[in-house]
Amino acid sequence: MKKWIAIVLAGAATHAHAQPAAPEDTSPPEAPATPAPAPAPTPQEPVAHANVNAPLYADASRDSKIVYVLSLGEPVSPFEIVGDWSHVKTAKGTGWVLTKFITDPAPKDPYEEHKPAAPPKPARPPDPRVAMPQVWTTPTGWLLPAAVLYSRTGVDTGGAVQSDQRVGLGDVAEFGVSTLDQVRRQTDAMAVPKAIQPYITATFRMGVGEDRLFAGQPGLVLGFRKSFERSLEDHQTRIAELTFVASKHLGKRAAIHFGGAFWDAELQGTGTDVALHDHTVFAVGDQLRPFGGIQVEPIDHAEILVDLGWAPQFCYACTGADQIKLRPELSWGVRYQVADWMALESGVRVPDIGAANLLDAQIFGQVTFTTWALRHAVDDLK
C-alpha cells in the first residue's frame, strides 16, 4: 500500500509544480512571447486490490449512498486520499472506500490454505479381455460390456466375405449388423447348393452375465436375428431366428455353450410363396433346433473352439416341405488372442454335415477387434 500511496502523493506534487511562475516581463512590448513549457508527464496510475468484500460509497462517508460492493481481490486505482478514505476508480466507475479495505499486492484467499487438495485422478486400469459373443456360427451367453465395440471380418475359400459389427448396451444388451454366407439355395433338388451372399441381418440380444444373479449362474442371453429381404434369380428370401443360450466357464480354461433356436424363413417367387411358420406345410418341430459349442484354452492366448449350428436352405423348384430346410453346420478352429483388443481366427466349416460332403467344406480366416475407446469417452464425460 505504501508504494501506491507514494505514487499518488508524487503525482499530486508533480501537478502542483508542473508550471513554475514566470519572471517579471521587462522586455519591450515588441519582444516575442516566452514559449509554453512542455506538458508534465502523466503520473503512473497506482493499482491496489480490495482485501475484503468492501462497500464503495458515493462520498467519503458511511452515510452516503453505496455505489456497489467491491469483491475480494478486485483491482482499483486510488487517485485521492482524504483521512481514512481513498477515492478510487474501478471498472464500473469511481467512488470512496475506506483505505484499510484496499491493499497492494492483491490479497490471498484467506481460505486457500484450508481448502483440501484435489485428489489425484486415479490411473485407468488396463482394459479386460472381452468374452466373445459368438463361437463360430452360434451365439454365446456372453454380452459385450457397455459401450464396447466389436468388429469381426473374415473370408473363406468359397470366395465369401463376412462381417459382424456390434456395440454393447449397458452390460445387459447388445445390437449389431452382420453379413453372412450361410444361407444357401438350390434351383432344384438335384442342384448343388450355393450361398446367397451377402445376406444382411440385424441382431439384438439381451440377458445377464455369469454369476450376476447368484453364484454359479451361467450367462443367459435371449437373442433375435432378422434379415433384410434378399432378391436373387427372381426369388425373394428372408430369415429370422429367436435364440436362447446359456454359457458357463468350467474353470479358467474351458467353457460350454448350449441353447435352442426357433427359426422362421420365407421364399417367394413366380408361383411360390411358402414360409416355415405356415403350419399347413411345416410342423412346429421344423422350426426348433438345438445348438451348442465348446472352447478350451490349452495354452495362454490360444483357444480351440467347436460348434454346431443351423442355417436355412431354399429350393426354388421343390414342393412342400422341401422348399425350406434347416441344415446342420459343423465348425471347428483356433482363436489366437494377439492382444486384449485383437484376435486372429481360422478354421473349417462344413455347411451341411448331414450330407457328409467334405468337398463342400470351407476353410475360413478372420480377424476380430474389440475396443473400449467409446466406453472411456463416455466415462470421461461423467
Image (cartoon, rainbow, N blue to C red):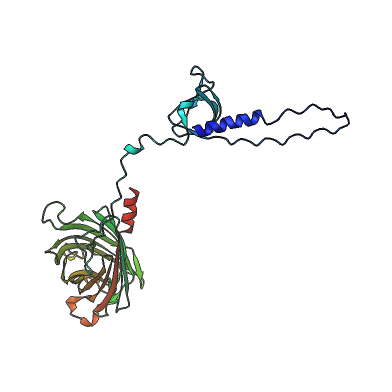
- Count the marks: how many? 0
Left or right: residue 139 versus residue 238 is: left
Q: Residue at x 30, y 66 (%)?
A: 369
Left or right: residue 101 versus residue 194 is: right
Residue at the extreme top = 63
Most foreground residue, 111 or 45: 45
Q: Residue at x 71, y 29 (%)?
A: 20
Image vertical order of residue 171 relative to residue 200, above or below: above
**Residue 85 visible in the picture:** yes
Residue 225 percent location from the top left of the image: 26, 61
Most foreground residue, 80 or 260: 80
Image vertical order of residue 338 relative to residue 63, above or below: below
Image vertical order of residue 118 relative to residue 262, above or below: above
Residue 123 percent location from the top left of the image: 28, 54
Most foreground residue, 92 or 378: 92
Residue at the extreme bottom = 359
Left or right: residue 165 versus residue 348 is: right
- The quarter holding residue 218 reads bottom left
Most foreground residue, 267 or 39: 39
Image vertical order of residue 177 relative to residue 108, above or below: below
Residue 137 percent location from the top left of the image: 23, 69
- The quarter holding residue 153 reads bottom left
Residue 312 percent location from the top left of the image: 24, 69
